[in-house]
Image (cartoon, rainbow, N blue to C red):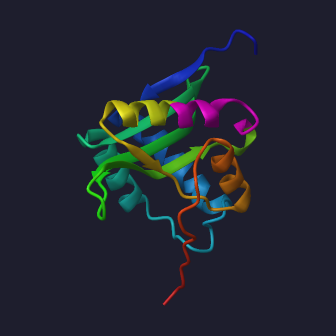
């Protein structure tokens, strides 16, 4: 265990199967399971777009050569201020790795890369109060609370 190499890298197209597997697990087991249906075709389109887009990044956290977490985000001119703002599309770490530093490493790498891309602010969604408390500990302020209903 002690000799395992871990680190962050940008995703490439050949990572798509692993990215899609993490996304499917996130939707099946996480807080979105009753709200967002898994659509592998839509997920693949989003992941590929994020990997290829000038204004997007998809980064992976690897442990011993296996991706165990990801962070995908886009930088856009905020629709109210016009200020370059990074917004998370997905942040996920495998449940059995959540007590490691993977999540925080992805988070901090995402902030750094977003700054390098010109972002002045970064936004994340909090699917649970626990995640929201973590964001607050990392210096984020709550802006709003979102709601969704099946129509």
Q: Residue at x 30, y 37 (%)?
A: 118
For residue 114, above or below residue 85:
above
Check residue 99 for magenta coloring. yes
Which contiguous range is marked in magenta?
97-108
**Residue 26 shows in the view:** yes
The kind of secondary structure the magenta stretch mainly shows is helix
Place residue 50 in its image quadrant. Answer: top left
Query: Which residue is more in the foreground, 7 or 105?
Result: 105
Closer to the camera in the image, 125 or 90: 125
Q: Is residue 13 left or right of residue 141?
A: left
Residue shown at the point (68%, 61%) measured from the top left = 128
Q: Nearer the viewer, residue 102 or 41?
A: 102
Residue sticking out furthest to the bottom: 151
Q: Give the residue at the far top of this rendering.
A: 3
Relative image position of residue 54 (x, y in whole percent): 23, 40
- Quarter holding residue 68: top right
Foreground: 123 or 21? 123
**Image point (54%, 55%), residue name:** 24
Estimate the x, y position of residue 137 in percent, counting from the top left. Answer: 69, 44
Does residue 35 lie above or below 53 as drawn? below
Quarter holding the N terminus is top right
Please state the horizontal and vertical placement of residue 129, each as a whole percent of the image. Answer: 71, 61
Residue at position x 30%, y 64% in the image: 80
């Amino acid at each position: 265990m002690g000799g395992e190499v871990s680190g962050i890298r940008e995703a490439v197209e050949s990572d798509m199967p692993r990215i899609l597997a993490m996304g499917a697990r996130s939707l099946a087991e996480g807080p979105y399971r009753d709200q967002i249906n898994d659509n592998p075709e839509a997920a693949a389109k989003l992941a590929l777009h994020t990997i290829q887009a000038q204004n997007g990044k998809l980064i992976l956290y690897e442990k011993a050569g296996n991706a165990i977490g990801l962070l995908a985000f886009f930088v856009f001119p905020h629709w109210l201020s016009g200020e370059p703002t990074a917004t998370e599309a997905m942040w996920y770490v495998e449940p059995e790795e959540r007590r490691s530093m993977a999540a925080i490493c992805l988070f901090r790498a995402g902030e750094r890369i977003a700054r390098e891309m010109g972002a002045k602010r970064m936004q994340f969604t909090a699917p649970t109060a626990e995640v929201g408390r973590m964001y607050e500990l990392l210096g984020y302020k709550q802006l709003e609370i979102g709601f969704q209903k099946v129509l």
